[in-house]
Amino acid sequence: GENVEQHPSTLSVQEGDSAVIKCTYSDSASNYFPWYKQELGKRPQLIIDIRSNVGEKKDQRIAVTLNKTAKHFSLHITETQPEDSAVYFCAASASGGGADGLTFGKGTHLIIQP
Amino acid sequence: DSGVTQTPKHLITATGQRVTLRCSPRSGDLSVYWYQQSLDQGLQFLIQYYNGEERAKGNILERFSAQQFPDLHSELNLSSLELGDSALYFCASSVGGLRTDTQYFGPGTRLTVL
């Protein structure tokens, strides 16, 4: 099945700086890569997703890049703000058959220092 | 608010007992997914139902079972509970049955097994 590795596990950045979180996946059939933000005790919230027919997607301060050849994708947050502090999860999924559903990385705890 | 609802919010029970968690998907969504989130295992996919039928199975224990009813709500049944079953249980829903469809998470049920 799919395996998703996520780095770093903790990331501390100064407010206003950029943050980058990286994920690698193992299944070359995976073609859907969402990112979720989870605040303590709350539900995971989808913040951006990308499908394998594009290499980059942006939504205001958030962008995701995908390199299918290298099997890795990254989340970029620019001009970080205190409300960006949370745990971020990447995930991967393949269409079609199989039992994996969404396979999640272990999460990155993003800390925005004032 | 994602539009996905889960009850109860919290559940405290004893080892060996059985509990039922309930999930109502967003209006119009046909798929329901169940996930378990624990500190050591992260977010793990358990099972997916699409329009009343089981579509995919992940790391779900034999002591656990689920079903989706004609009104599309779903229930996750956990039996012979063990201390290690203590976790946050999320359901998510999506419009279609593909695992590449965007999934929206409910607020979760926190299960504590004493």
Image: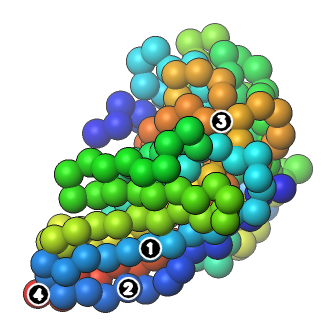
In the picture, the disc for residue B53 is: none
Q: Which of marks 4 and 1 is nearer the N terminus?
A: 1
- Picture quadrant of residue A4: bottom right
- Measuring from the top left, give residue B18's x and y in whole percent: 72, 50
Q: Which of marks 2 and 1 is nearer the N terminus?
A: 2
In the picture, the disc for residue B99 is: 3
Report the chain holding disc 3: B
CA distance separating discs 3 and 1: 23 Å
- Measuring from the top left, give residue B72's x and y in whole percent: 58, 18
In the picture, the disc for residue A11 is: 2
Q: Is residue B6 visible?
A: no
Q: Give, as a three-letter code, the residue at label 4.
A: Pro
- Disc 3 + disc 2, Cβ < 8 Å: no
Most foreground residue, A51 or B95 = A51
- Measuring from the top left, give residue A22's x and y in whole percent: 51, 72
Tag 1, which secondary structure?
strand
CA distance separating discs 3 and 2: 29 Å
